[in-house]
Amino acid sequence: MSKLIPMACLALLGTAGHAWALPQSSDQAAAATDPNSRSTAAPAAPTIQQGVAQVRVSGARADDTEARRISTAAKMVFGREELDRNGDTSVSEVLKRLPGVTLGGAPGRGGGGVRMRGMGNGYTQMLVNGERPPPGFSLESLSPDQVERIEVIRGPVAEHSTQAIAGTINIILREGYQQKDIQLRLADNIEQGRHGANLGLTMPGKVGSLSWMMTGALMQNRPHNESDTVNLSTRKDGTVERRQQIHDEGEGVFDGIFLSPRFSYKFANSDTLTFQPFLASNRSRNGADSRLDQPIGTVAPEYAHQRSDAHSHSTFLRGFGNWLHRFDAGARLDVKFGFTGGRNDSATFRNTFDAGGGALRRYVDSDASRDSGVNTGGKYSRPLGQGHLFAAGWDLESSRRRQEHVAAGDSAALFDDGGASLAAQSRRVALFVQDEWDVTPQFSTYLGLRWEGIRVTSDGGENGAAADVKNTSKVWSPVLHGVWRIPGHEKDQVRGSVTRSYKAPALNDLIAVPSISTYNDATRPDRSGNPHLKPELATGLDLAYEHYLGKSGLLSASGFVRNIDDLMRRQTVLVQGPAGARWVSTPVNIGKARTSGVELEAKFPLTELWPQAPLIELRSNYSRFWSRVDGIPGPNNRLDQQPKQTANLGLDYRAKGLPLTLGGSLNWTPETLVQTTVNETATTGTKRQFDFYSLWKLNAMAQLRLSANNLDPRVYETARSLDTGPLVQSAATQARTYTTFGIRYEMKL
């Protein structure tokens, strides 16, 4: 109890104090949940199985906490309770409440990427069933109903790719049930009077040695977007040379279908063959109007009114399979295989008009991409003694992308490279070894080494709009994790990790088809790739202290440091080309960076502090981040998009004598200002989101869930500024956000 109160107050006050003082503006850890999981974040040690892990507690939440506790590497597990709690319609909305996880983009809109420890896109490795999802796959298209659990791994492990400087989020799709219930979920989400339906079905079954789980979802969303942007060109003496005010407003319809059947067959010799494909197909139709007013400026504006109509259709198919064979003496071979196929077609038509309504120009932007790939891998593991497990494995992956892009105005190419095509191939080879050892009943260690090589090649297509590219990266990644269970304090333990991880250049950063900005300026540049990019390499240190409470409570304090070499950043420069001088944004390696942070977490029922307390469970986490990029002047020379802090505060109340649960949460990220280059800054405004839910259990087979997300909607602000020498060009946007109300009926058949 002496440790409980100060740590709880520290985490809760760290969260609530910052959140409420906001300005009004501006093979063993996974075994607890899945015996067939391929995750290696925890030791599959016989001593753990026979000692600590033999204490079994009931309830999914307790299993999640137990899986976290026995894991050697720092891994958090979030199961069905967390996924169902708030009635979220996308996995990204679930992720934003997890410790140290933030989302880009406006509240409730997503699309800005998932980030751990505040680091920008690309630093967090996203996996689905332990594999990288197909290109273009979005978490917005994945319903929580289709997910079994989410694993958040703070440090890299050898079995997975070490492209995880910030960490790894592994989304495990629905697996086999012990029960035989068919589960049906019907939901409706309402935003500004617009309805978005969601239907989910989960149907298990078994015949002889064959078992299956059929899961699927149909969803529709009708978003409305409205924003105001001010573009300024200002001289050094403060004189405004040009001022543009742009009001954008539009709405659309998003339809999606998701299917993920899972088949498992157990042979007479106890071999197991599992196959789980997932299919995601999305279609969207959007219309928007943009009205431009230019009160200051001698050059006529590009338009007074622009009407845009867009449509897109994407389909992704991914297959996961594995064959598990067990040998004598506890050895086993797990061979995995898979394939990927995807296509995305989109087109945007823009018509511009002058102040009198007269037609000016018509623009067409169309893009068609095709992705395909195959992969295989495996792991051979063998016990070397009591509590000692050795494993070695491989990963092979080959993928291909074809892309056709057209940018035209009045049926003619806008620029010399207004139409472009490319074909790109990527090959990845990885080998790893790992040793998991319970050195003593109190101390366990995980030592791993992974070599990974990636080769990307591309040709510029028939018209040669993009140059031929060859880029090869090879990385050695040693990783060391350890956990010490304090003698005499079975609920207290200390974790430590020393790791090597990396961030590979994204395909589009290497060989992007030129992205042409119709209204080119310093804040709206063209975008291109850089075939000479090198991967970022990071050396990391992690330390954590954990204290476990009862069946599912936890207090945790952790810290981390990452030293990064060959940091990648986009730089915007003025380039002379066949079409004249144009602003172009290109990724480059700029040097070294360092980031560190402290993360606090507390979750426990009030009865742990006061036995007569109401049935309230508190959930709280707070993170503070620091970073510095060499070669860029301070004080805001931080990692791109990294906030200084973030926090979550939530509680759940179970009414006595009623089948009713009430709960709510606050998600907060403060304003962030980053000096991205020597002459460029980026600002993201404060994000604060209140969510509320209620759950009424009608009977043993049915329940009704009501929710309200973003109860206090605020304007979401972003801005960019670039000092070009004679002028400072800036763009500041204010986007409106909205409250979404949801109702969901869940039943078992």
Image: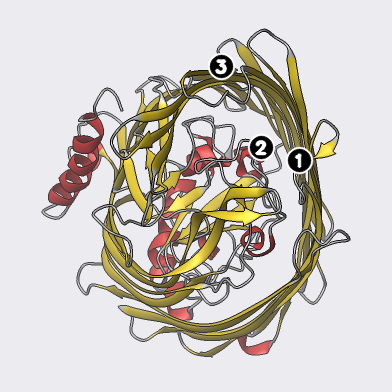
Residue 375 sits in quarter: bottom right
Specify the amino acid type for callout 2.
Answer: Thr
Q: Which residue is mark 1?
A: 414
The residue most toward the right is: 462
Q: Nearer the viewer, mark 2 or mark 3?
A: 2
Percent position of residue 298, x then y = 50, 24
Residue 687 numbered tag: none
* Placement of the C terminus among the 4 image quadrants: top right
Depth order, front residue of 69/674: 674
Mark 2: secondary structure? loop
**Is 500 rendered above or below residue 136?**
below
Depth order, front residue of 344/68: 344
Specify the amino acid type for callout 1.
Answer: Leu
Q: Residues within 10 Å of mark 1 (few under 14, many from 20)?
A: some
Depth order, front residue of 502/58: 502
Labels 1 and 3: the sequence-earlier one = 3
Percent position of residue 421, x then y = 82, 55
**Is 617 rendered above or below residue 221?**
below
Q: Which residue is mark 3?
A: 191
Tell me the CA gap for discs 1 and 2.
8 Å
Percent position of residue 437, x then y = 43, 84
Q: In this rendering, would 213 be left or right of 653?
A: right
Labels 1 and 2: the sequence-earlier one = 1
Percent position of residue 592, x then y = 37, 71
Tags 1 and 2 in contact by the CB under 8 Å rule?
yes
Mark 3: secondary structure? strand
Tell me the CA gap for discs 1 and 3.
38 Å
Q: In this rendering, would 497 be left or right of 346?
A: left
Labels 2 and 3: the sequence-earlier one = 3
> What residue is shown at x 57% (from left), y 45% (from top)?
525
Q: Residues within 10 Å of mark 2 (few under 14, many from 20)?
A: some
> What residue is shown at x 61% (from left), y 51% (from top)?
527
